[in-house]
Image (cartoon, helix red, strand yellow):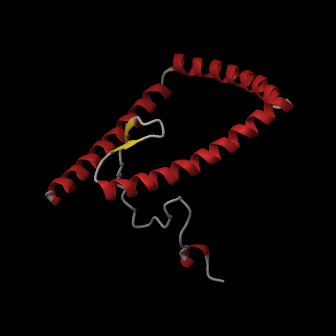
Amino acid sequence: MDLSIIRERMGQLETFKQENKVGREALRNELENNQEYLAVCEEIKALNLKKKRIKDSLLAKPETQKLMSDIKENNEELTILDEILSSELTEYYTEKKTDEIEDKDGDLRKFKLVAKIMPKKDKYDDRDDEGKYAKIDQNIVGKN
């Protein structure tokens, strides 16, 4: 694969992302200057507050709390299982060079591996992959 093609495609991605950013800002400005739109937004905000009050009262019930706890536990388990399966399928693909695997019922299932390019790091961006500050410039916070 020609590396220049990959670099060109990366540049195209950045260009389209920037164009979308500018376009979204223009749309936001257009909406913020429309009085009819703003009035409807206020009505929706009032209805959303009413909806939130009703929802909060329903979620406060003990039986609902139990359901929410069960769902949270299941989601945590799903996340762990997803990560493990992803790792195992990547290893399987590396070994077998195929994107199909038989499931426990004997059915042939396809899977896909996903690669994503990470956003460019600003030269002043000192955050790690999780968005936390990786290092702190002592000139900014003051030396102790």
Q: At which x and y percent is residue 13?
A: 28, 47
Residue located at (48% from left, 50% from top) = 85
- Comparing 140 with 19, the one in front is 19
Q: At which x and y percent is residue 141?
A: 60, 73
Q: Please state the total of marks drawn on the protein image.
A: 0
Q: At which x and y percent is residue 63?
A: 83, 30
Left or right: 107 as drawn, with respect to 84 = left
Residue at the bottom extreme, as displayed: 144
Residue located at (35% from left, 51% from top) = 116
- Comparing 112 with 101, the one in front is 101
User: Is 46 placed above or below 82 here?
Assistant: above
Left or right: 133 as drawn, with respect to 60 = left
Left or right: 124 as drawn, with respect to 19 = right
Left or right: 61 as drawn, with respect to 108 = right
Q: At which x and y percent is residue 117?
A: 34, 54
Residue located at (41% from left, 51% from top) = 89
| Among the 4 quarters of the image, the one containing residue 68 | top right
Say which quadrant the N terminus sits in.
bottom left
